[in-house]
Image (spheres, grey):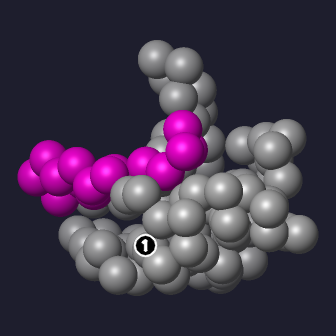
Amino acid sequence: MPTIDRVKSHPRFNQSMDARKVARWLENRFRETVQYQQSTGRWTYRFLHKSLKGCSFDHSMMVDIFAEMAFSYSLDETRSGNFFTYGIDGLYFGNEEL
């Protein structure tokens, strides 16, 4: 597993990547619609498509996704009912049963 320093030196790592860029990346990656909102100083992403209703993403899948985005491998997972939130380097996203 790469260290944070190795990840941050990755040519695709962008310190200034903003929420809109991340949301577009997620839309392209999952071919789903995502929304983003700023709450308590952290960005939260929710998948809106009904096919993801009640869906859970496992830890290894999230690690792979963020590795592709060239972020650190440290990953937080929070579960509350059918809502799953994953966070990494201050970016948070999840899926929620609508």
Numbered range of the magenta stretch: 76-91
Residue 47 colored magenta?
A: no
Snapshot quadrant of residue 59: bottom left
Q: Position of residue 79 (x, y in %)?
A: 17, 52
For the point 73% across and 57% down, the residue is 8
Q: Position of residue 80 (x, y in %)?
A: 14, 47
Using the rendered image of the protein, determine whether residue 44 is visible from the camera's viewpoint.
Answer: yes
Residue 89 magenta: yes
Which residue does the image show at 22% across and 49% down from the upper left?
Answer: 78
Res 38 quadrant in image: top right
58 sits to left or right of 95: left
* Residue 77 sits above or below residue 33 on the image: above
Q: Can residue 33 be seen in the rendering of this structure?
A: no
The one nearer the camera, 86 or 80, is: 86
Q: Residue at x 27, y 55 (%)?
A: 77
Q: Position of residue 46 (x, y in %)?
A: 47, 52
The kind of residue tagged 1 is Met
